[in-house]
Image: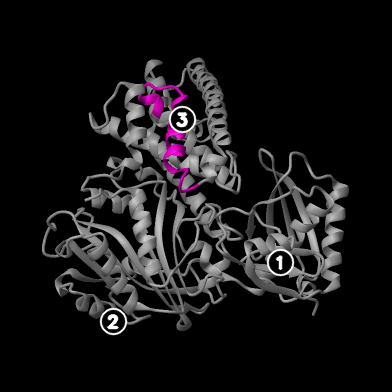
Amino acid sequence: MEKWTGDRLRKAYLDFFASKGHSVIPSASLIPENDPTVLFTTAGMHPLVPYLLGAKHPAGTRLTDVQKCIRTADIDEVGDPSHCTFFEMLGNWSLGDYFKQDAIAYSWEFLTQVLKLDPDKLAVSVFAGDEDCPRDEESAARWEQMGLPRNRIFFLPKENNWWGPAGGVTGPCGPDTEMFIIRKKPCGPDCSPACSCGAYLEIWNDVFMQYNRTPDGRFEPLAQKNVDTGMGLDRTICVLQGVDSVYDTELYRGAIEKVEELSGKKYGESDDVTRAIRIVCDHVRAAVFMLGDEKGVTPSNVDQGYVLRRLIRRAVRFARTLGIDDSVLGDLATIFIDLYAHVYPELEANRDKITGELAQEAARFTRTLQQGLKEFEKLVGWIERSGGEKVINGKTAFRLYDTFGYPLELTIEMAQERGFTVDTEGYHAAFAEHQAKSQAGSEQRFKGGLAESTDVTARLHTATHLLNAALRTLVDPSIEQRGSNITPERLRFDFNLNRKVTPEELKAIEDWVNEAIAADVEITCEEMTVDEAKAQGAVGIFTSKYGDRVKVYTMGRYSKEICGGPHAARTGELGAFHIQKEQASSAGVRRIRATVDGPKE
């Protein structure tokens, strides 16, 4: 029988759900559109939030896809057997169509009949219930009907079996049921999928969005109940191939062999070598997809560009521990582009950009390390001249890491060569303080996403359409959107341009948008094919991200654009438009921040 591979699993999944009446839709960009709750698309549901909230999807009420995803919260876990920065999420959705009964039946059929997994090696968890919402007996009963014995159905609390709201405060949410492969004997009578012993490996999750959490903390039943599922392709292939790690599949094999060839070290020869090889390969794969994305992400000091820069520099650092120079990044990028380009053609289209940016960023990192070395020598020289204790304090060690990219182990090594020690406890305390501040800042910053859509965010989203049209009309007709971020306070719009927008142009843009607002034209929405949208002059990046049919929003003579987000009913609802700032975002990309006043009382 044919061996399971990534290509085979993608096709099997999409074919199965297509046979169940699901429309196959393409993967969206890794950069979320108009959603500030996340920097990257972290799950298949993110591009579908407007439709989960009730908007009509052009492809219908049953959807399936393979979505590109990036998750960086577990970056320090990368290098273990199961964590990856970039991954592909297999998903299927019901938008107010079927619910728990069919979703669970489909999952069971796919796992046992298509993937041929041993039913005796499967276990599931369901929501245990609490004071907010009842125990999910319906899901448990359905699993029993499928043939799963009660002793392999685990009731777990919200921290294990609950999804949402997306913004953490209000919006759609509900219980989920997670599916696990039993990989070894449970550690004891109380062992469950919540245990960290490694007996249970999660491979699929069915989320049942049946409640809306209100601002006062109540959980109200949703009028439209949705199903949102997610199955990690890497992890599932690992199970199907019977290997211990996602890095032991064909998705990483070519890259790992290249690192072995260049380094002279063997994958598996030691824990440190294995971890370093995995990190280099994982981070380069993630960087390839970020750089190759249609939204044009490049290394920078903010937002997605900062994450990309960190991944590239981390890959360089671990490559050096293996005795490899920076050219390995280009070698690995070529391997990953060749491996995935038939699925994601944007990688081939951006091949030169990917390899070029990797080389440039590696060179920048080398210069930064040299600056850090000068800073280190200045510091050590000052301590020696002052006759102080030969200790580099923790905050200084962390500054060398945070500012110059110097890892703690490198600082310790250089310090030892000069007869110094490093306050490692102080370093870790400074690192923890930095993480806490970053997390608090993120929680404050990422509020008001599409999952918490309001009239305010809808007006700001509408303003991005008018801003885009004004830029194309007044500055350069080749301008395209490179990103958009909306909070309840302001909009942020990124676009391609190789120069600063002049003050005179900004004034003209502001006046143009305000003219469109003053005209108070109706905002209409039509569904049509991509070819029809092109023929009508609709703005959009015409790539495989669009399905057969799209929504086109028209604002009189001012704007016609493909979009799926929330909009005002008329342009006059925006009140007035004000540009706050124009600045560089990354190489060849500019950024405008703006606000709208809203309707006059």
Q: Given contact means CB atoms under 8 Å apart, are the residues at marks 1 and 3 in contact?
A: no
Q: Position of residue 475 (x, y in %)?
A: 82, 48
Which residue type does callout 3 highlight?
A: Leu
- The stretch in magenta equals 319-344
Which residue type does callout 1 highlight?
A: Thr
Q: Position of residue 479 (x, y in %)?
A: 74, 49
Decide: few, some or many residues near mark 2? Use Cα within 10 Å; few <14, some 14-19, many ≥20: few
The structure residue drawn at horizontal position 66% and vertical position 74%, both measured from the top left corner, is: 455
Is residue 341 one of those drawn in magenta? yes
Figure check: 283 above or below 511: above
Q: Which mark is residue 363?
A: none
Q: Which mark is residue 138?
A: 2
Q: On the image, which quarter does residue 407 sit in?
A: top left
Give the Cα separation between the discs numbered 2 and 1: 41 Å
Q: Which residue is mark 3?
A: 329
**Which comes sooner in the sequence, label 1 or label 3?**
3
> Can the viewer see residue 10?
yes
Is residue 92 one of those drawn in magenta? no
Q: Nearer the viewer, residue 71 or 401?
A: 71
Q: Which residue is mark 1?
A: 462
